[in-house]
C-alpha cells in the first residue's frame, strides 16, 4: 500500500517538474523521463535560447525550456506518436553555447551534432532499451515534419519559439495555453482560424523585431568575434567545444590569451552601453546584417493563410523589411 502511494507521488512530482506557464501539464512516459534526465538534454538548461541577447536583455530562457515546450505541443497534438515525441525532445541537443550566435562563425552544424549525440552510447542505449531506433529518430529530424513544418507552413518547433520569446519579453496579450483550443496541427503543420492566424503572425513579427534588431544581431556578432579571436590565439578541441555550456564558454573567454577576446566578452558582460550601431558600413567596426527572414505561416482552410489574407501578406512584407546591412562599434 505504501509503495503504491509512493509511486503515485513520484508520478505527480515528475509531471510537476516539467510544468511551465505556456501549456497545460503533460505526463512524460518512462522513456521520456529517462531522456529528460540524460546529460545531452540537461545540458540544454545551460544554453541560452536567445543567444548573446541573453547577456544584455531580460530574455533569458534556455534551450531546455524550449525543448519542453516543443515536446509538450507534440504530445498534445500527437499523443500516440512516441517516435515523434522523442524527436521533439532531442531536436536541439546539438546546439553550441549561446545557440546560433557562434555556429556559422566556427563552421559548425548543430543538426549534424544532434545526429552524432543521438548515436552516442548514452542516448542510443536509452532508446534501444525502449525499442526505439536511434536512426529512425534521426530520419524524422532530417525530413520535413510537423516539428519543422512542411514547405511554407509554420511548425511546432518555431511555434514554441515565437510563443516563448514573446512571453519572456512581455509581448503577449493572451497566454498560449488559452489559444491552444483554436490551434491544431495537421500532417503539414499548424492550422488555425483567421483571427488566431493573424495573431500568431503578429507574434512572429514582434519576436523578429526584437531578436533581429541591429542591437541584438550586434551582440551575437561580438560574441562570435570574441570566440574567433580566442580560437586564433589558443588551441580548441572542436569536439569538446561542442559540449560546452554558456558559462563554460564565458569563463574560457574571460581568461583567453587573446586581449581582443577578453575585451569583447567583458564589454558584453559589463559594459554593453558602449555598443553602438552605425547605419552604414564605414569600415571601422564589425559588419552586421540580416538578409534571410522567416517566412512560414499557419494554415487556414487547408491553405497558407497568406493565400487568403491581405493582412497576413502585409505582415510578411513587414518581416522582410527588417533586413539591413550596417556595423557595430565599441566606443571608448
Image (spheres, rainbow, N blue to C red):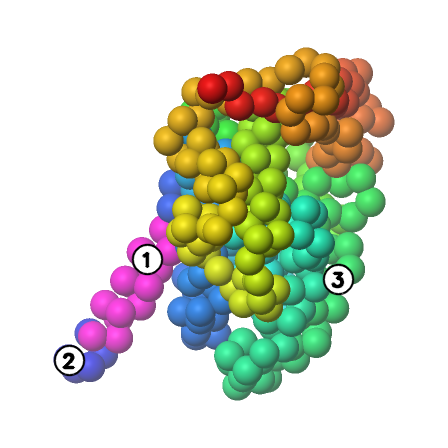
Q: Secondary structure at mark 3?
A: helix
Looking at the picture, how far across and down is residue 17, in whole percent?
A: 32, 57
**Identity of the residue drawn at 66% across and 52% down:** 106
Where, by quadrant of the figure, is residue 79 drawn?
bottom right
Q: Secondary structure at mark 1?
A: helix
Looking at the picture, how far across and down is residue 253, in whole percent?
A: 46, 48
Looking at the picture, how far across and down is residue 332, in whole percent?
A: 47, 19
Answer above or below: position of 220 versus 236. Answer: above
The answer to which of marks 3 and 2 sits earlier in the sequence is 2
The answer to which of marks 3 and 1 sits earlier in the sequence is 1
CA gap, disc 3 and disc 1: 30 Å
Magenta-highlighted residues:
6-19
Q: Residue furthest left?
A: 2
CA gap, disc 1 and disc 2: 22 Å
**Identity of the residue drawn at 59% across and 29% down:** 218
Identify residue for label 1: 17
Q: Tag on residue 2?
A: 2
Q: Residues within 10 Å of mark 1 (few under 14, many from 20)?
A: few
Q: Secondary structure at mark 2?
A: helix
Identify residue for label 3: 142
The answer to which of marks 1 and 2 sits earlier in the sequence is 2
Q: Tag on residue 217?
A: none
Q: Is residue 134 magenta?
A: no
**Marks 3 and 2 in Cβ contact (< 8 Å):** no
**Residue nearest the observer in this picture, 280 or 200:** 280
Mark 3 or 2, closer to the camera: 3
Q: Is residue 62 visible?
A: no
**Residue nearest the observer in this picture, 253 or 191:** 253
Q: Is residue 19 left or right of residue 94?
A: left
**Residue nearest the observer in this picture, 110 or 219:** 219
Amino acid at each position: 500500500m505504501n509503495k503504491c502511494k509512493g509511486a503515485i507521488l513520484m508520478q505527480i512530482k515528475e509531471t510537476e517538474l516539467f510544468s511551465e506557464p505556456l501549456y497545460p501539464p503533460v505526463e512524460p512516459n518512462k522513456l521520456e523521463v529517462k531522456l529528460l534526465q540524460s546529460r545531452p538534454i540537461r545540458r540544454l538548461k545551460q544554453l541560452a535560447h536567445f543567444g548573446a541577447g541573453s547577456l544584455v536583455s531580460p530574455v533569458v530562457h534556455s534551450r531546455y525550456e524550449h525543448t519542453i515546450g516543443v515536446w509538450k505541443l507534440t504530445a498534445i497534438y500527437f499523443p500516440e506518436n512516441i517516435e515523434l515525441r522523442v524527436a521533439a525532445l532531442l531536436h536541439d541537443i546539438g546546439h553550441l553555447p549561446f545557440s546560433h550566435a557562434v555556429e556559422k562563425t566556427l563552421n559548425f552544424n548543430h543538426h549534424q551534432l544532434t545526429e552524432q549525440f543521438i548515436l552516442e552510447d548514452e542516448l542510443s542505449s536509452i532508446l534501444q532499451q525502449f525499442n526505439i531506433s536511434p536512426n529512425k529518430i534521426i530520419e524524422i529530424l532530417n525530413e520535413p515534419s510537423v516539428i519543422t513544418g512542411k514547405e511554407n507552413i509554420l511548425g511546432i518547433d518555431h511555434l514554441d519559439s515565437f510563443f516563448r520569446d514573446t512571453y519572456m519579453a512581455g509581448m503577449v496579450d493572451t497566454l498560449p495555453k488559452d489559444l491552444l483550443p483554436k490551434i491544431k496541427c495537421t500532417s503539414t503543420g499548424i492550422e488555425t482560424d483567421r483571427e488566431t492566424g493573424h495573431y500568431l503572425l503578429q507574434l512572429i513579427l514582434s519576436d523578429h523585431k526584437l531578436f533581429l534588431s541591429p542591437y541584438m544581431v550586434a551582440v551575437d556578432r561580438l560574441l562570435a568575434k570574441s570566440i574567433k579571436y580566442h580560437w586564433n590565439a589558443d588551441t580548441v578541441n572542436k569536439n569538446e567545444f561542442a559540449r560546452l555550456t554558456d558559462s563554460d564558454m564565458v569563463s574560457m573567454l574571460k581568461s583567453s590569451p587573446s586581449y581582443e577576446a577578453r575585451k569583447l566578452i567583458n564589454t558584453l558582460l559589463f559594459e554593453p552601453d558602449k555598443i553602438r550601431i552605425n547605419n552604414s558600413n564605414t569600415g571601422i567596426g564589425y559588419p552586421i546584417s540580416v538578409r534571410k527572414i522567416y517566412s512560414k505561416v499557419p494554415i487556414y482552410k487547408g491553405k497558407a493563410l497568406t493565400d487568403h489574407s491581405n493582412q497576413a501578406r502585409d505582415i510578411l512584407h513587414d518581416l522582410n523589411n527588417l533586413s539591413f546591412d550596417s556595423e557595430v562599434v565599441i566606443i571608448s
